[in-house]
Amino acid sequence: MHLPQRRHKRGGRVKKTITLLGSTGSVGVNALGVIGEHPEHFRVAGLAAGTRADLLKEQIERFSPRSVYIKDSACAHELSHIYGSALTVFSEKEGLAVFAASLNSDILLAATTGTSALLPVLEALDRRKRVALANKEILVMAGSLVMQKLKSSPGASLIPVDSEHNAIFQCLEGAASDAVEKIILTGSGGPLREIPQELFSDLTKEVVIHHPRWKMGKKISVDSATLMNKGLEIIEAAWLFDIPIDKIQVLIHPQAVIHSMVEFKDGAVLAQLGVTDMRLPIQHALSFPQRLSSGASMKLDFTKIPNLTFVMPDRKKFPCLDIAACAARRSGSAPCVLSAADEVAVNAYLDDEIGFQQIPGIIEKVLSRHKHVVNPDLSEIQSIHFWALEETKKLCQAR
């Protein structure tokens, strides 16, 4: 099977080439929607997926990438057989980092879950490329290494895709770093905001993963239900915007119209507003500093917003928020352990190995057992992460 001929230019404009890690996930599918809406600006160079080979094939047919990665070797062999010399296929055997580096794209969009994108992100920054980061875990586990690499690579850029951090990025554009008083991370409160804590033991999985505002994958939906997502976002914001943890505030904003805010020293507050559609921050991260047009569905209608309300999060009801904040203040290796423990505990819950209310206790126990490292290097981070994964698995299996 032959793929359509690739073109690098349209109307004299050089397109930005994009390598997309996590193309079959929620963010990846939305990103390809944005790219498909703006073919004059972007060209897909590479697509990486985990196991959803059928969806990856559909994406190959539509976007004609030069290379693809799929974790499973058998699936990779099948794709090689189908497309022959028209497509270079990578699998876990070669590794995600080798795949990404081989393409040398203008933009690396990291939309995987977990930590598999860490090495590709570091290498893209080292090659002075733009990284559009839609993965919380990368900065949580290795924020120091990522930001050091960014600072030592002139011309490289790191633009967040998470709606909250992308909102802050936009609010801070052109502002002096010493002008910021605090960052205000907003969140809808998740699917359990109005459900009393005493009913948590009776929750069905369908209720836990049904987010009232956003369409997301199961893992991040559970993180939203526990408010761990806000805890991880605190750590991510601290690294991205070089601001102390104590100057980052979390506010529950059920309408999810304001995606985050920045308060400045003079008392002024800038907020970024928009519809709850991941295509908006994705498009911004890919097109920055340009602003590309969007369809009517991505435009905010103020006449349909009855009110905007804000409340403080209930930290007793959602202990994961304080667990994450504590790990953030300790810094060093603690956030890496936090991220790994949360990943395993959430997946154990989704696989019916543990109950929803056991998630915070398991994460706390793993954090209490780990030997803290103040300034871990890459090798230490990888080792600590592996230890935390295995330790959490043991605890989940013992329940």
Image (cartoon, helix red, strand yellow):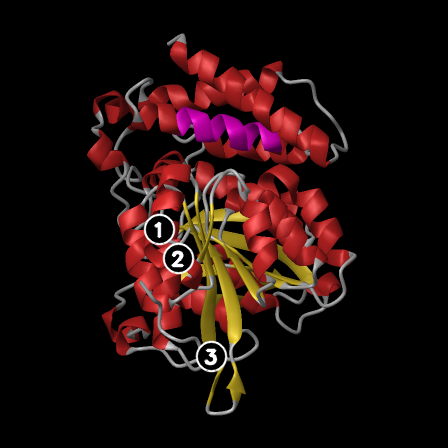
Residue beneath the point at 67% across and 57% down: 125
Q: Is residue 67 above or below residue 230?
A: below
At a point 37% along the width and 64% down the height, the residue shown is 32
Between disc 3 and disc 2, the foreground one is: 2
Compute the Cα span from label 2 to label 1: 6 Å
Label 2 packing within 10 angstroms: few (<14), some (14-19), many (20+): some
Secondary structure beneath disc 2?
helix
Image x and y of residue 245, in percent:
64, 43
Residue extent of the magenta highlight: 336-346
Q: Amino acid at mark 1?
A: His
- The quarter of the displayed image where residue 31 is located: bottom left
Question: For this view, does 62 lie left or right of residue 390?
Answer: left
| Residue ranking furthest to the top | 398
The residue singled out by tag 3 in the image is: 41
Give the class, few, some or many, for how many residues have Cα within 10 Å of label 3's Cα (few <14, many ≥20). some
Q: Position of residue 272 (x, y in %)?
A: 47, 67
Residue 319 visible: no
**Residue behind mark 2:** 84
Disc 1 target residue: 81
